């Protein structure tokens, strides 16, 4: 199946890998491959199903975290992902994963859904440093998509949690100055 995928035969590859997965029963590598194939075919609901199933089996597989950055997920799914991986992933890696959960929705300009995922992530992340790192990076992602007001809101939240978070105040002033101009 993976050979077929490399040859661009995504639909045939999916059929073969699904069959192999049924026979082998929940191999995280196969599930991740299925998820990637689904993403290539634009089948994000199916991709999400396979990645979440693989994470339930093996939450510390970091390549699954990368795969998640290509799949739009909702707040409850983001919470499930974080609860699965927090015992296994810490520090900057956890912050990068959290930002990755919001990235597809930001790219799709689904800002109300982004806000839901952001709220869920902030509630779920265990440390204030991670929460602020997440909010600061999400603000940067929002800013890169031209969503200045949404970026300002996330920076304000960051500064409410940690008033001296490095760079947040300066970026907020810079954005607000540009908004006023």
Image (cartoon, helix red, strand yellow):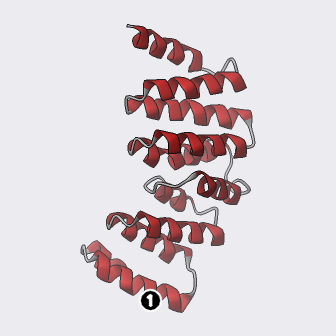
Could you say which quadrant of the image residue 70 lies in? Answer: bottom left
Indicate the position of residue 26 as horizontal and vertical percent values: 57, 81
Indicate the position of residue 36 as horizontal and vertical percent values: 41, 66
Extreme residue in the bottom direction: 23
**Residue at 29% in and 73% down:** 6
Q: Where 83 falls versus 55 (above or below)?
A: above
Total count of labels: 1
- Few, some or many residues within 10 Å of mark 1 (<14, 14–19, 20+): few
Indicate the position of residue 112 as horizontal and vertical percent values: 51, 40
Could you say which quadrant of the image residue 59 lies in? Answer: bottom right
Residue at disc 1, secondary structure: helix
Position of residue 153 in the picture relative to residue 79 (left or right): left
Nearest to the observer: residue 18 or residue 156: 156
**Residue at 37% in and 70% down:** 37
Position of residue 108 in the picture relative to residue 140 (left or right): left
Position of residue 112 in the picture relative to residue 40 (left or right): right
**Residue at 55% in and 74% down:** 28
Position of residue 129 in the picture relative to residue 77 (left or right): right
Nearest to the observer: residue 155 or residue 24: 155
Q: Where 40 falls versus 15 (above or below)?
A: above
Nearest to the observer: residue 49 or residue 134: 49
Query: To which residue does mark 1 refer?
Result: 19
Image quadrant where one finds the N terminus: bottom left
**Residue at 50% in and 57% down:** 68
Indicate the position of residue 145 as horizontal and vertical percent values: 38, 33
């Amino acid at each position: 199946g993976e050979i077929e995928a490399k040859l661009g035969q995504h639909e045939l590859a999916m059929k073969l890998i699904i069959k192999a997965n049924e026979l082998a029963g929940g191999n995280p590598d196969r599930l991740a491959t299925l998820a990637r194939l689904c993403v290539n075919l634009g089948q994000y609901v199916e991709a999400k199903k396979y990645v979440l199933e693989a994470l339930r089996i093996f939450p510390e597989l970091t390549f699954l975290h990368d795969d998640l950055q290509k799949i739009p997920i909702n707040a409850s799914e983001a919470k499930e992902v974080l609860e699965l991986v927090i015992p296994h992933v810490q520090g900057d890696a956890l912050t990068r994963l959290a930002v990755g959960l919001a990235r597809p929705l930001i790219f799709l300009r689904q800002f109300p859904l982004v806000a839901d995922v952001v709220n869920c992530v902030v509630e779920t992340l265990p440390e204030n440093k991670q929460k602020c790192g997440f909010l600061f990076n999400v603000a940067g992602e929002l800013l890169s998509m031209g969503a200045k007001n949404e970026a300002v809101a996330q920076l304000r939240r960051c500064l409410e949690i940690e008033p001296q978070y490095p760079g947040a105040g300066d970026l907020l002033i810079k954005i607000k100055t540009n908004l006023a101009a």
